[in-house]
Image (spheres, grey):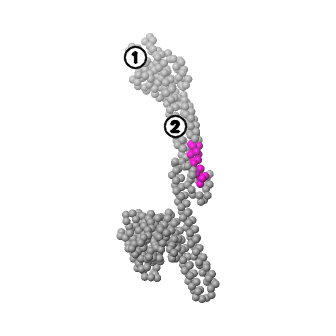
Amino acid sequence: MLLSDLRLSLRFRIVAVLSAVLAAGAILLGFAAWHSSSLAAQQAYDRLLAGGAVQIAENVYVQGGVVTVEPPVSTIATLAAYDLVFYKVVDPRGVVVAGYDDLASDADPVDIRAGVVLEDGLYQGQPVRIATLARQIELPGTNNWATIIVAQTTEARRALARDLTLKALGVIAAMSLLALIATAYAVTLALQPLMRIEREIASRRPDDLRPIAAEPPVEIRNLVQAIDDFMRRLSERMAIMQRFIADAAHQIRTPLAALDAQVEILLATPASRRKADTVKRIHERTAELGRLTGQLLDHAMVIHRKDAAATAAVDLNELAKSVLAKTVPLSLPREVDIAFIPAEPPPIVNGDAVSLREALGNLIDNALKHGAESRLVVTVGEDAEHAWIDVADDGEGFPAPPADLLRPFAKGPASSGSGLGLSIAMEVAKAHGGELAVWRDGWMTRVRLSLART
């Protein structure tokens, strides 16, 4: 696996994040273990030191008017078994009666009379822990308080703290490693549903766009539903394109066959008037084939742009005016009064201007070729929910029910068109949240391209 693939791996990311979390936790626990171990070692040795100071204090007494002390050998031996031990006994007069004269304590005299006071200090260049205690004795002419100071070096304490810390760190490291292994295994198990979904998709044929059968985990259920929805839309789009291709192939065969037949007739006919008629029919067939090819391409373009094209604000007044000017030819075989009625204020819709031009162009072209006898009116309007463009003509209306003519390649019995104009307009209307409506209004036939407002 390449490094880039490894970085994109979900398993690698989860394990890496958990490793970082476990490492940070191990460091924090290590500091906590060191602090707890140091505190435990301090407390353990402090109890021994305080107990030693109390035992020495219990062996301080007055004999013949002089303060005397008999250091308990066993106590000092116990303390000395771990570290160096120093002590000093001072009688109520301030005279050192035993121990090291230069051993000193900073403990408050009031505090040491209430109990043992422990403190850190430095003696003979070594860090020591000092226990100070005052004992009341009867000695006339004094304050009757003798002071006992016991000091012990701290090497054994540090050694015990290190030993406890290392053992705790070993446990933390072992638990972190086990947690990491368990996490990696758990991630592998958790990714099994994804691997099943991957195998199911990989084993399918290219045309198999059924919903995924494998039951997804809750965390990726929305993702799988989005994939299923995408495959459904793709299947619908493929079905539309396949049907369109099949219909287009069928429709193109007819004018091509007719054109081929006319060419054969032309080749077999001597130069005469019939030859001119054949050339005319060839011209008509060629124009019909050109119109059909153009509308097939327009239909394919509309289907493609339905979900792919970016939308923008479109002024329907400007759109209708420009399409009308471009679609109406400079000369018509009959006199047709053409009118344009804009809306005030201009309706604005969010849509694809290219598709809207194609749809409106087809409606105007249909009205001019198959409907309008003397009048064509293009009207723009709007209400609270929709904006629309009406194309009305004074023709005789449609030769078949409008619902039948909205299907691709559907046309009247006497029509020479391709049967795609209304179908293209309907597809564009649906893509813009609207509809295509056809009805007879008095002596006018109206086709309304309705669009959802922004």
Q: Residue at x 58, y 37 (%)?
A: 174
What span is colored magenta in the figure? 183-201
The secondary structure that most of the magenta stretch takes on is helix
Residue 166 placement, left or right of 357: right
Residue at disc 2, secondary structure: helix
Q: Residue at x 54, y 77 (%)?
A: 288
Above or below residue 13? Residue 170 is above
Mark 1 = which residue?
144
Question: Residue 89: where, in percent of width, then height?
Answer: 46, 19
Mark 2 = which residue?
29
Going by the numbered disc 1, the residue's amino acid type is Asn
Identify the image quadrant of residue 282: bottom right
Q: Residue at x 56, y 82 (%)?
A: 281
Above or below residue 131? Residue 9 is below
User: Is 179 or 98 nearer to us in this picture?
Assistant: 179
Question: Residue 433: where, in percent of width, then height?
Answer: 44, 63
